[in-house]
Image (tube, grey):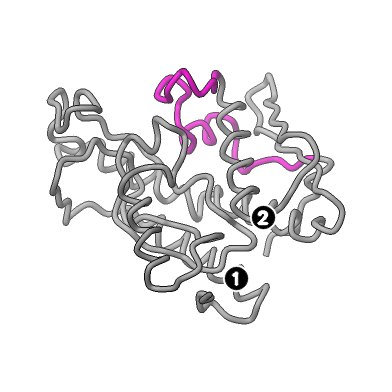
Amino acid sequence: MIDAPNPASGYALPGDAAYQEQLYPNPREIDPAIGLKTYADVIAHFTASSLAQDGIPIDGSVVVTGDTSRGPYTVRFQPQPGFQAQAAQFARMHVSFLDRGCAGQALNGATACAATSAWNPMAGYPVNNSDGPSTWLLYPPLGMPMANHRAVTLLHYPPLAALRNADYLNNMTLRRWAQLLQCVGWLVGRRSTIRRRPAGFACATRISFRRSRFPVSRAAFRSLTSARRDLCGSTRPARN
């Protein structure tokens, strides 16, 4: 069990900057119009998104600093009164999610796969009319709720547009999924989505990668559901 850090005074993300920069999207891969110019900007953006998804209000903005000696990035934010306990739980889950036993497994899997011909077999060729040449990039489920999620959804990958827009939920696949959940009466808010294959792909209509293995999702699922169990004594999703 990881001790709960203090978000107001700042907490270090696991590993060093080089490790953390492999887990977050490269700013050069994100739409410049979004304004994320550095890895610190990217980390702050996805952290703020997770806090908003968790319903944890903060004063000011998320501040992310990096050590010039390439030490770890540090995250700091000030939760509003009454949300300190939830913010501490969020910080603990943030660190746990990014450690080598969880997101690090996705990095190991992607690195191993990238050394084979199975990685991006259509490199250099367009698979749709909007994403350009086929590109595969590691993309863990960033920006999702971590402390107050009421459900965990396991899906196949969303499109590369989710990475380039720096918004895990704003793509046709997940908008449609949210619509279906609402239609059958499930509570859509505070829902964490994880993938069997945590990489961003330029998507054609139907592509199946049966032999790819990215174990982060099992680790992420255990981490997220165990946190939910700690908070509520149950991992069952809530209904309206």
Residue type marked 2: Gly
Which of the 4 image quarters holds residue 149?
Answer: bottom right
Residue at the front extreme of this rendering: 183
**Could you tell me which secondary element the residue under label 1 belongs to?**
helix
Residue 21 included in the magenta stretch of the image: yes
Res 70 → quadrant: top right
Callout in the foreground (2, 1)? 2
Q: Residue at x 71, y 38 (%)?
A: 75
Counting residues from the start of the chain, the first of labels 2 and 1 encountered is 2
Residue 203 is situated, as x and y percent measured from the top left of the image, at 21, 40
State the residue position of label 2.
55
Q: Quadrant of the N terminus?
A: bottom right
Label number found at residue 228: 1
Residue occupying image coordinates x 63% and y 55%: 54
Gap in angstroms between the C-alphas marked 2 and 1? 15 Å
From the viewer's perspective, tell me whether residue 78 is left or right of residue 99.
Answer: right
Which residues lie in the magenta part?
10-37
